[in-house]
Image (spheres, grey):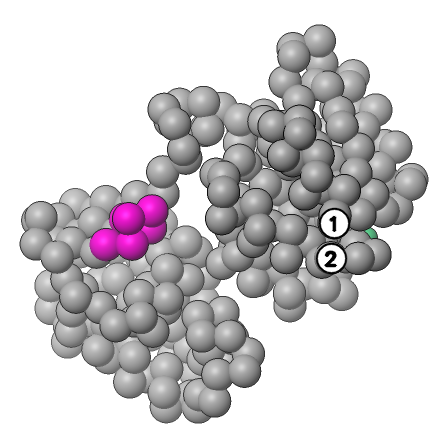
Amino acid sequence: MNGIKILVVEDEEKILDVVTSYLEKNGYTVKQARTGRQALDYFKEEEPACIILDLMLPDLSGEIVCQTIRRKSRVPIIMLTAKAEEKDLLGGFTIGADDYLTKPFSPRELIARVSALLRRTSRNEGPLSLIYEFDDGLKIDTVGKVVKRNGTIIKLTHHEYMLLLVFVSHPGRTFTREELINLSFGAEYPGYDRTVDVHVKNLRRKIEVNYKDPAYIITAHGMGYRFRGEDDEAPV
Ligand code: CA
């Protein structure tokens, strides 16, 4: 036993059993919850070091549970999703999940993700900080919700900030304009493709060193946009 407590929230007994036994075999202490409400109760009572959270639960959705916990805590959360739910999964990151696994997953993979997340969290004193700093002085602080270049605040509108948040948390991933609207502004936002282009244009003017030759928000022709990933050149 390593004394680390993990809360597993899953209504499918079979998966709950497998996940629990693997975690226990690896020295973790497991608290099981089968509904969203139970998850929220146990989160308060047990103070787990990490939460494994199924997206489809019989009462509250995993999304609601995740958002509720995020208002109070930076505890690492791994979402479990089924393939068919992948569209929702995209939203998982914006609602505050740290990682996700698609069913069926290998329990060994889950253990690896749990220990990686716990390592990341333990390196940070206090709450997990999500601050992105770039070589050219751009700093995106998603905890304080401030964007700066070389210490000077860059004023963004709410929509620009939400858009940037989706981009920066998924470097290298190409999003369609529709995905960007859904993830940044919510599916009920009455946006058109053109709306995204306008926000991207404004965002580029604010965060790019040279907005005519953007280094952060890159146009993926015929597809949409992506935030600079490992395969893209760093700005000069
Ligand atoms: Ca389920």
User: Does residue 216 show up?
Assistant: yes
Label 2, label 1: how far apart the Cα atoms are: 5 Å
Image quadrant containing the C terminus: bottom left
Residue 17 position, x and y percent, is 88, 32
Q: State which tag comes first along the sequence, 2 or 1.
A: 1
The magenta stretch spans residue 142: yes
Q: Which residue is mark 2?
A: 60
Residue drawn at point x = 48 percent, y = 38 percent: 74
Are the residues flagged by discs 2 and 1 in contact, CB closer than 8 Å? yes
**What amino acid is labelled 2 in the image?**
Leu
Quarter of the image with the N terminus in it:
top right
Q: Which residues are magenta?
A: 141-146
Q: Is residue 194 left or right of residue 133?
A: right
The image position of residue 230, as x and y in percent, is: 36, 49
Quarter of the figure with residue 6: top right
What x and y, as percent, mark residue 202? Answer: 21, 78
Element type at marker 2?
loop
**Amino acid type indicated by mark 1:** Gly
At a point 36% along the width and 68% down the height, the residue shown is 163
SS type, badge 1: helix
Residue 196 sits in quarter: bottom left
Q: Main secondary structure of the magenta part?
A: loop
The residue that label 1 is drawn on is: 36
Write the residue at 85% across / 47% down. 11
Would you call the spot at circle 1 few (<14 residues within 10 Å), some (14-19), or many (20 or more)?
A: many
Q: Nearer the viewer, residue 209 or 232?
A: 209
